[in-house]
Amino acid sequence: MTETRSHEFQAGAAPGGKIYYVDSVAGDDASSGRTTQRPWRSLERLNQVTFQAGDMIRFRRGREFAGMFTPRGSGSPGRPITIDAYGTGPKPVIDGGGATAAIMLSNVEGWQVRDLDVRNEGPPPVPGEQRAGIYVLLEDFGVGRHYVISNVDVHDVNGPDSRSPIPSGGIVFVAGGTARPTGFDGVTVENNTVEHADRLGIALMSHWTRRDRYPDGTGSAYVPSKNVVIRRNRVKDVGGDGIMIYNGVRALVEHNVVDGFAGRSAEFNSGVYGFNSDNSLFRHNEICNGQRNGMALDIETADNGTVYEYNFSHHNNGGFLLTCNDAGAIANNNVIRYNISHDDRDGDGSVPLGVITVACGIATNLRIHNNTIYAPNAARVINNLGETAAEVSSNIFIGRSAGSTITDPHGTYSGNVYHNVTLRRAVDANAVEADPLLAIQDGQTDADVHWFQLREGSAALKGGDPTLEHNGRDYFGNAVSGTSPNIGAYQGPGVTP
């Protein structure tokens, strides 16, 4: 899979571009705004300007700016318009005070936002209201290009429990409208924090989802989200979903931490996932502390060619993985491999979830292999509530000491390790029913991926299937043997306790 690249920041205003300075204490909206000695004072003054490609807007560090920043004008990939900070001290604060957004980029493109502190807390929201930290909205725009958000802290956004059609959350992109097909090409969201936001953490959504693979999708056409990179962000304490992408094509979501999600939403929510997306890669993410029925990963409606690899999921109440394709949609050729699940559970009891739940319409060619699932507090390790026939191979499944179940009348199982899991051998003719001897010890509940290495003498060592696909390495960076791989996510030699 080709890795998408992030966009580089301009070091300053592009040639011919102007720099504007803003200082909420020492500034004056009647001044030129063009030097640090004569800055403007308010967001209202900035909102009167139509910025040009190559311009730069710089906020004074240590200052707070109240209101909604709604800049006008567009840059280009080679000459973006940049928002950042100057001076010394804490990041400048943009406080929306409960507005639709603290920063709203509406029907513009070619923008870079960095080095800000953004909040948008207001009165308790009412149904149908919208509230976001940073909101990028395109309506009947066509394809918008080049958006970068980096090193921004977004927090305290008390939006309603709404994902669609009016989403609220920390950093939200929406391709909307009804007349002109609209989407994004070139979105990089990296090195940000999103904390205490409702309902979404980081989201790229679209109203243009209808295609042959999703005939019941919204809008009259399908517009892909291209060149999307979401990396090295920390999302903490969000009411619903952590990171989500609609219509992603070869999107890259990596090295993010989603810690605490699904705590304030009545719907099902996931930590990291794509929707109606093709050939997207989700890797090296840590997803933890999902509340209620919050699950870490999700193969969603009309996902095709999705790969989840090298992710660390732990302490999620709704489990490690959900597959849920809408009836009539096509979800094909999705792979979940070389991930680690530590003490993920099987839901709050409102629905009979498993650590892995297969539900909704049929997903074809779904492959789940070389994962390590350690579930000492889950009654159900796998529960198939639908008709999808997943291929489940070379995984390690460890249940609770009293015994956990796998209920799956449709899947095909081969060469998995089962410990404290009830399974009829006829389901997996090559089953290994033994303690796999993980490095984790009884009573260890904190999260440490190194506990999921295999000890010397493990029956999982060199017992895997060499025909299963891989990227050459395991979660820990060990090479995957082409002749005698291990079962599970760890592919190194046996370790000494």
Image (tube, rainbow, N blue to C red):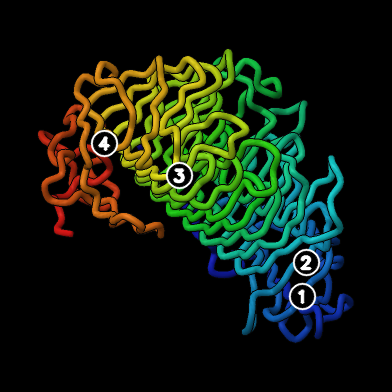
Q: Amino acid at mark 1?
A: Glu
> Which residue appears at 61% of the width and 29% of the height?
223
Q: Amino acid at mark 3?
A: Asp
Question: Closer to the N terminus: mark 4 or mark 1?
Answer: 1
Q: At numbered mark 3, what does the secondary structure look like: helix, strand or loop? A: loop
Alpha carbons under labels 2 and 4: distance apart: 46 Å
Question: Horizontal and vertical percent for residue 325?
Answer: 54, 22
> Which residue appears at 27% of the width and 28% of the height?
393
Q: Amino acid at mark 4?
A: His
Q: At numbered mark 2, what does the secondary structure look like: helix, strand or loop? A: strand
Question: Horizontal and vertical percent for residue 412?
Answer: 32, 18
Q: Is residue 286 left or right of residue 271?
A: left
Circle number at residue 470: 4
Q: Quadrant of residue 208?
A: top right
Residue position for label 1: 64
Callouts 2 and 4 close, C-beta under 8 Å: no
Counting the numbered discs, the total is: 4
Q: Nearer the viewer, mark 1 or mark 3?
A: 3
Circle number at residue 164: none
Circle number at residue 95: 2
Q: Quadrant of residue 141?
A: top right
Q: Nearer the viewer, mark 2 or mark 3?
A: 3
> Which residue appears at 22% of the width and 41% of the height?
435
Question: Closer to the N terminus: mark 2 or mark 4?
Answer: 2
Residue position for label 3: 344
